[in-house]
């Protein structure tokens, strides 16, 4: 699996990752009050068929990717740092900020 990563200005609202020297995700902490860094999971993934098979093997219609899939594949996830504009828009405040920083063309 490859995970998109971005630098966040609000790490307490994101899943924060730690990479090793080869760009492999070695730690993932979801929404900590005192995060250890600001390199965030962008929630965009490229998955091998093995990932989809694992999800199917859980046998449930709904799963939490952050807590049920990512930990299972820890140490086998490649991080890809997104260049350019990338912002988490999971809150109304963050969405409004994104609209100000990157307005839609008229």
Image (cartoon, grey):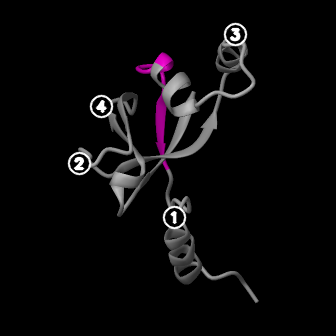
Q: Give the residue pinned by disc 4.
A: 21
Residue 34 circle label: 2
How far apart are the two marked residues, 2 and 1, measured between alpha carbons?
A: 26 Å
Work out how far the residue at label 3 is from the one at label 2, CA to CA, in angstroms: 34 Å
Q: Residue furthest bottom?
A: 106
Q: Residue at x 58, y 31 (%)?
A: 64
Q: CA separation, marks 1 and 4?
A: 22 Å
Circle 3 residue:
57
Picture residue at 52% right of the left edge, 66% below the top: 85
Q: Which residues are magenta?
A: 72-81
Q: CB atoms at circles 3 and 2 under 8 Å apart?
A: no
Q: Secondary structure at mark 1?
A: loop
User: Height in image: 38 above or below 27?
Assistant: below
Disc 2 versus disc 1: nearer the observer: 2
Marks 3 and 2, the one that precedes in the sequence: 2
**Sooner in the amino-acid sequence: mark 2 or mark 1:** 2
Q: Quadrant of residue 29?
A: top left
Q: Which mark lies nearer to you, 2 or 4?
A: 2
Look at discs 4 and 3 and give the one toward the viewer: 3
Answer with left or right where residue 42 lies relative to residue 14. Answer: right
Verify CB contact (< 8 Å) between mark 4 and mark 3: no
30 vs 48, nearest the viewer = 30
| Farthest top residue in view | 57
Query: For the N terminus, which image quadrant?
Result: top right
Where is mark 1, residue-wise? 84
Circle nearer the N terminus (4, 3): 4
- Inter-mark Cα distance, 3 to 1: 36 Å
């Amino acid at each position: 699996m490859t995970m998109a990563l971005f630098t966040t200005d609000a790490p307490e609202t994101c899943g924060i990752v730690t990479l090793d020297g080869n760009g492999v995700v070695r730690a993932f902490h979801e929404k900590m009050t005192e995060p250890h860094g600001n390199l965030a999971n962008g929630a965009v993934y490229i998955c091998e068929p093995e990932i989809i098979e694992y999800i199917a093997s859980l046998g449930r219609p709904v799963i939490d990717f952050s807590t049920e899939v990512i930990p299972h594949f820890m140490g086998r996830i490649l991080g890809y740092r997104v260049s350019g504009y990338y912002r988490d828009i999971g809150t109304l405040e963050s969405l409004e900020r994104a609209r100000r920083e990157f307005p839609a063309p008229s």
